Amino acid sequence: MSTLCSTKLVPVIAAPWNIVLTLLFVATAAICLGDLVARRRRVSDGTGLTDADLIDLNHGVMSIAMIVMVWWSVWDAVTWAQVAIFAILALALIPSYRGAKAAKAVDLTGHIALDAAMIWMLAAMPLLMAGMDMAEGDGGAHAGHQGGGGMMLDATPAWADVTNVVFLGICAVAAVWWILRLFTARHHRIHTLCHVAMAAGMGWMLVLMNL
């Protein structure tokens, strides 16, 4: 991947999935960021972000980034800035393991795993979409990510296909875990459903990018 910045914004996902995924991630962003803002407004003593705040911030920012990726290939500089942001968000969740019960620890692992999948998706987009037909300005076709200089590979390397399957599996496991939590948790069901949607949407995005 080139370190130069691309100057083009190119559609990535074809219809109807661009609409479906956009609506999905708009919903997750609204739930997470809306709850974060409401919770912070109730805080009057200036305390720092809680675990719940960090998780909502994580998924809210992730949802916005996913919407961008659905519609446009991102500039290289923006891509690496997002990689840094999601690495920081993942690291910020690690202290929450201290004293966490088993279910919460698994939840945290799921959130961090989705951060890792997001980083993979951002960094590997040119590899995953290698060989796709360019259809700039045509909403009915896929368009590959172009790095600086517009260089594209003819096919996705086998190691990238395998790695993508691993991250797809991680997203699937996270989604199944939170589906189970829907039936066992007595509260925060909307947030749990939101996490299911995030994991499933990210997993399907990995599939669509690698077709």
Image (spheres, rainbow, N blue to C red):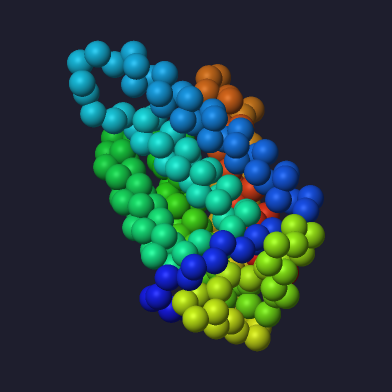
Does residue 36 appear to the left or right of 196 in the view shown?
left
Picture quadrant of residue 153: bottom right
* Place of residue 137 in the rendered image (x, y in percent of width and height, measured from the top left): 70, 62
Nearer to the camera, 158 or 26: 26
Q: Residue at x 55, y 19 (%)?
A: 186
* Place of residue 25 in the rendered image (x, y in percent of width and height, measured from the top left): 60, 41
Confirm whether residue 162 shows in the render: no
Does residue 103 appear to the left or right of 96 in the view shown?
right
User: Where the C terminus falls, by quadrant?
Assistant: bottom right
Where is 98 relative to 166, above or below?
above
* Place of residue 86 in the rendered image (x, y in percent of width and height, measured from the top left): 39, 52
Where is 181 relative to 63, above or below?
above
Nearer to the camera, 23 or 185: 23
Where is 87 relative to 191, above or below?
below
Nearer to the camera, 38 or 194: 38
Q: Residue at x 48, y 46 (%)?
A: 62
Confirm whether residue 45 shows in the render: yes
Does residue 115 appear to the left or right of 42 in the view shown?
right
Q: Residue at x 74, y 51 (%)?
A: 17
* Place of residue 117 in the rendered image (x, y in percent of width and height, measured from the top left): 50, 58
Picture quadrant of residue 101: top left
Where is 101 relative to 147, above or below?
above
Residue at the bottom extreme of this rendering: 154
Q: Residue at x 46, y 30 (%)?
A: 33
